Image (spheres, rainbow, N blue to C red):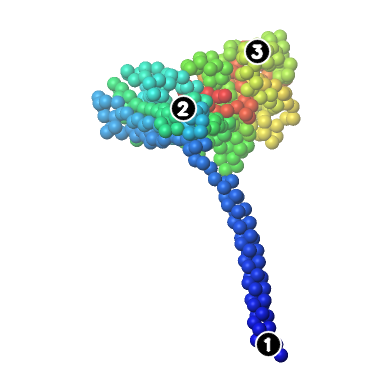
Amino acid sequence: MKSFIDRVKSDKLLFFLSVLIIGLFLVLIIRITYSYLAASINEAGNNVTMGSDKTDELNFIKGDNLVLNATPTTLPEGGANYVDSTTYSVSLKANSTNNTANYTYYVYFNIPTNTINYIEENTPEVILTIRQGDNTITNISGLTYGTYNGVAGFDITNKTGLFTVASNYAISSTSSSTATLQDWTFTLTYLNQNYDQSANYGNSMNVEIIMSKEEKETSMTLADYIISTYTDGSNGLYYHDANLANSAADNSYRYSGANPNNYVCFGSDASTCPNENLYRIIGVFGSEVKLIKNTSLGNYYWSGSDSNESNTWSSSTLNTGTLKGTYLSGFSSTWQNKISTHSWKVGGMAYSQTNTAKQYYDVEVGSSSSSTTYSEKIGLMYVSDYGFATSPSYWTTELSNYELSKSSNWMSVNISEWTISRDSDLSDRAFRVNSTGFVYNFYVYRRSLGVRPAFYLTSSTSYVSGSGSSADPIRIN
């Protein structure tokens, strides 16, 4: 039996060992916890940004959209101009580390909706004035700057679309406490003219201001733009699908009626499009837009010569010499490159006094057409192009009686002119549109007639601006 002293010694040893074990365990726990927390703290520290000490502050400060509602109240007869103005600002503050910051930015305005129209031709109704600080902006692609009734600015009477005001506009700062500020003031003025403007009552315009560090896509393809304006025929644009009665049923979009807004300026960048550069849109075919010259190039034999009796388009010197040569070479390479090399159907069809636009379409270029084609940039209108350019109510009328539809057909320009379509039954005849409006076949060598070149634009051709009226034709990029 152990003595009392031996038991005491044994208990002290056990206590000491217990304390040592507990201590070692606590040390281990603390080391593990510290290691975990240290890693978490380091990870959090790596994600911390020091705010204005290391970053610049570039801000766009928005104003309001510009809105114009034409009413007898906003534009009373004999009253003052209607004015709406807004200011957008850009501020830049440098970081406190460098105290220097340099940036560039972009400024745009967009007119998504606009139903304001010219009442008197070429007389502006709505003017947009843009100022950056004390500087007035006087140059914007696709717009004309001038002074109208004492108001200086851009005529945007019937404009729609996105316009670039400034690209890579510079702003700099040398302070981390006081921001550099650049103000842009946009003023919309509806001119109170000295004539009756009530025709615009109920119409409106909305102008959005856009500022961005990155450049925005300011264009859409011309084909997409035209399709976007489709309103079930109310603006003269018709979608020729299987549901449209008596149509081509080829899923094309075609302009029809007396005078739709289908003008395009081609071959010129002048602020006012020269008459010689005015073209009109026949329609959208797939992703390509087909144009025809608004006025005649002059009078020519279809075959190119009064001694050439052949109606084969590939051997016609009107084609190879005049259109492919003289006419096309009159454009710079930039404009020539906008014209697609197209496969033209040139097999033609037999003349019929009873054929309607749809019947001519089917045998001319449609499901029953000849396989004869000719690949080239420039051609002429098809008979069916002319047939479908009149109001839909005439699409069941035979083209030999189309003088009835002349006043409702924008493609009729009061001249006798050639089409590209030959008479497949008679080797010396092609189809012509008479000055009175009807269509029939005629000798290719017997008489020179008007020629209006037609062509397809490449699918990448972009819409820039313009409502499509003769005073404000569509501009392309």
Q: Which image quarter: residue 337?
A: top right
Give the x, y percent position of residue 171: 47, 26
The residue drawn where x is 60% and y is 42% is: 242
Other-residue count near label 2 (Cα within 10 Å), few / some / many at <14 / 14–19 / ≥20: some
Tell which residue pokes out farthest to the left in this image: 78
**Quick check: 208 left or right of 438?**
left
Q: Quadrant of residue 177?
A: top left
Which residue in the protein does label 1 denote? 3
Task: Report the residue at 63% width, 34% height from top.
Answer: 286
Q: Relative to 310, does residue 167 appear above or below in the rendering?
A: below
Q: Residues within 10 Å of mark 3 (few under 14, many from 20)?
A: few
The residue to which callout 3 is attached is: 329
Visible in this render: residue 391? no
Of the two numbered discs 1 and 3 on the same chain, state the one appearing first in sequence: 1
Q: Secondary structure at mark 3?
A: helix
The image quarter in which residue 19 lies? bottom right
Q: Quadrant of the N terminus?
A: bottom right
The one of 230 and 74 positioned closer to us in this rendering: 74
Seen at 55% across and 35% down, the residue is: 227
Residue drawn at (62%, 14%) of the image = 332
In front of the other: label 2 or label 1?
1
Q: Is residue 459 left or right of residue 54?
A: right
**SS under mark 1:** loop
Q: Residue furthest bottom?
A: 1
What is the number of the mark on residue 174? 2
Q: Residue 190: x and y, percent? A: 34, 27
- Mark 2 secondary-structure assignment: loop
Q: Earlier in the sequence, mark 2 or mark 3?
A: 2
Specify the amino acid type for callout 2. Answer: Thr
